[in-house]
Amino acid sequence: MKRFILMAAIVPGAALAQVSEDAMEMQRCIWRCQAEHGAGNAGYNACIAQYCEDGGGESFTPPVAAPPPPVQQQPALPAGPGVLAGIWAFGTHPALGPVAYITTSAGTVGLGCGKVGGYTLGLRFSNSFAAAGPVTLMTAPSLTAASYPRRQGDWSGADGDVCTLPVNDLAGGSALYILPAQIEALNAEGDGTRITLSGAGRTADVYTAAEALTAFGGYVVPLAGADRAIGALLQTCPRAQQDMQYGCGD
């Protein structure tokens, strides 16, 4: 079963696609499996096959005890400058609170549980990644992308929920590309997507995250451990649980 891509945006936190109710029901079921098992492991895949593929997830009941997921191996990343090292973890960050995050030599990226009465989740990255201004975050291999302005202070990012932030793409991807450029246009072409990026006085059309890195430079943040860390975050974030159950209030 193909994974459902949550968003690809040219503005922070804005989803480009509307999905049918049937597709939303299946996605809710996938989120429940992810919260119970993490993503990209045997338990997660078995959960989807048993509960989501035929019935849309309405009969889903998490098992009392799930087998531990296998140890995730460090994914293969491109070579070259800007390729960072590290593994995602779940914990309490002094600035971000309860968060699934990775700290690298260039800065930190995290997905945290929002405050009561506010947003559901917050995507944050160190402003050291955005020293030149706006940046585009692009996940591989899904090519889900969004551009974010540089905020004042130490952190930039966006507030949202499990429907508008790239939760699945971070949990199931191999790498997160942080590019010193912003999206100007996004066009579907056959089986691919052409993304027009601009930055540092130039514009380029790219079809892959690797092409974007070659054109603009930037950083490659590994997503090793992100499935477990984000799964733990979703299990302990009440508003995220509500989003997964009810589809962000739709």
Image (cartoon, grey):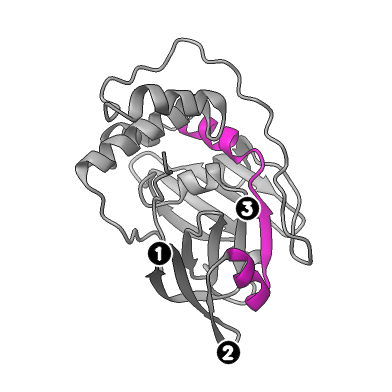
Which amino acid type is shown beneath numbered disc 2? Gly
- Report x, y in % for residue 196: 48, 77
For label 3, the SS is strand
Does 178 lie within the magenta span?
no
Q: Is residue 182 left or right of residue 118?
A: right
Tell me which residue sits at (33%, 42%) in the image: 117
For label 2, the SS is loop
Picture quarter with the N terminus = top left
Q: Say which residue label 2 marks.
A: 201
Which amino acid type is shown beneath numbered disc 3? Ala
* Magenta-tinted stretch: 209-234
Q: Say which residue label 3 marks.
A: 175
Does 215 lie within the magenta span?
yes
Q: Nearer the viewer, mark 3 or mark 2?
A: 3
Q: Say which residue label 1 marks.
A: 9
Q: CA–CA distance between discs 3 and 2?
A: 26 Å
Majority secondary structure in the magenta region: helix
Tell me which residue sits at (56%, 46%) in the image: 96
Which amino acid type is shown beneath numbered disc 1? Ala
Tell me which residue sits at (36%, 35%) in the image: 239
3 and 2 marks in contact (CB < 8 Å): no
